[in-house]
Image (cartoon, rainbow, N blue to C red):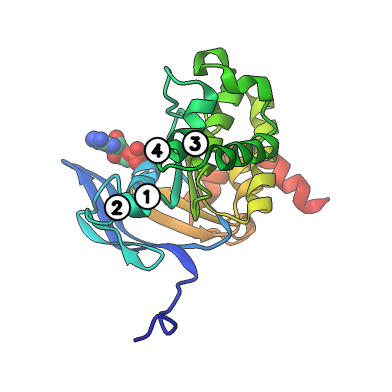
Amino acid sequence: MSQQDYHVPDHIFKLSGVSKAYGETHAVRSVNLSIPKGLTTVLIGPSGCGKSTTLRLMIGLLQPDEGTVLFEGNEITRANILQLRQHMGYVIQNGGLFPHLTARENITLMAHYLGWEKSRINLRLQELVDLSQFPNDGLERYPVQLSGGQQQRVALMRALMLDPNVLLLDEPLGALDPIIRSGLQNILREIFYKLRKSVVLVTHDIGEAGFLGDQIVLMRGGNIVQKGTIKELIHSPAGPFVTNFINSQNSLQEVLQEEYE
Ligand SMILES: Nc1ncnc2c1ncn2[C@@H]1O[C@H](COP(=O)(O)OP(=O)(O)O)[C@@H](O)[C@H]1O
Ligand SMILES: [Mg+2]
């Protein structure tokens, strides 16, 4: 097969029969899931249902007990993981910024490590500062000197610095108060749209899922209960759990209002 005949997949990740247990806890059970390119997929479900584990399996921080994880058509292995991960931007739950580095140093660390020219680094950094509406004078501050919302934007810029093929975000707005959170949801939606990135976002907020997600994946006890758009989940629920989960969260009122406006 020549290089040109090689089939380029239209999904960025493909999980087939993936299971992962921690001792007795079956965190992820026989999951089949394709993450489409250029769209935002949201993983949602109650605490402990396996969202973060699924994300960690995608970026190769965890190996599945069973099944396979493909990234752009390649199975993730110990041999290729470091290479592949340079094409994945990841924001862990709570941001995970290095406390002893300034915002600028956090964001540009990998680019320096990879030997990027200073001018290229500064150009990319300025693009990201503009995109995320981050104050320029915040770049020289340490994480403790930044607000929660600013810290999350630094984590986001760090994940986007190398222009990854996919962006994975684990509850990026989870710890923020509602007003800051809603402002950042708007910024995130604009960034996803402008960059046309493939995005996998974890949240437990159905309103946020409906606002940001093209595809929503509802999980429970390590299984996928339903995949679809927010409207499909509302109007054609796969079972009572779906409806109960949606109705238990009043943040959905905004999504419903938008729908009927
Ligand atoms: N490192 C770990 N060791 C043991 N159990 C874990 C570990 N990480 C997660 N779990 C368990 O696996 C299940 C799924 O966890 P997780 O993927 O973090 O859920 P979520 O992100 O949806 O809250 C939970 O029961 C959790 O307690
Ligand atoms: Mg989690």
Q: Residues within 10 Å of mark 4 (few under 14, many from 20)?
A: few
Ligand 2 in which quarter: top left
Q: Are marks 1 and 4 in contact (CB under 8 Å)?
A: no
The alpha-carbon separation of the residues under discs 2 and 1 comes to: 6 Å
Q: Are marks 2 and 1 in contact (CB under 8 Å)?
A: yes
Work out whether residue 39 can be spotted. yes
Q: Which residue in the protein does label 4 denote?
A: 113
The alpha-carbon separation of the residues under discs 1 and 3 comes to: 20 Å
In percent of the image, x 24 and y 53: which residue is there?
64
Q: Which residue in the protein does label 2 denote?
A: 81
Q: Which residue in the protein does label 1 denote?
A: 85
The mark closer to the camera, 1 or 4, is 4
Q: Percent position (x, y) of residue 245?
A: 52, 44
Q: Of the residues shown, which amino acid type is indicated by label 2? A: Ile
Work out whether residue 43 can be spotted. no
In percent of the image, x 46 and y 40: which residue is there?
111
Q: Of the residues shown, which amino acid type is indicated by label 3? A: Glu
Q: Which residue in the protein does label 3 denote?
A: 171
The alpha-carbon separation of the residues under discs 2 and 4 comes to: 17 Å
The alpha-carbon separation of the residues under discs 4 and 3 comes to: 27 Å
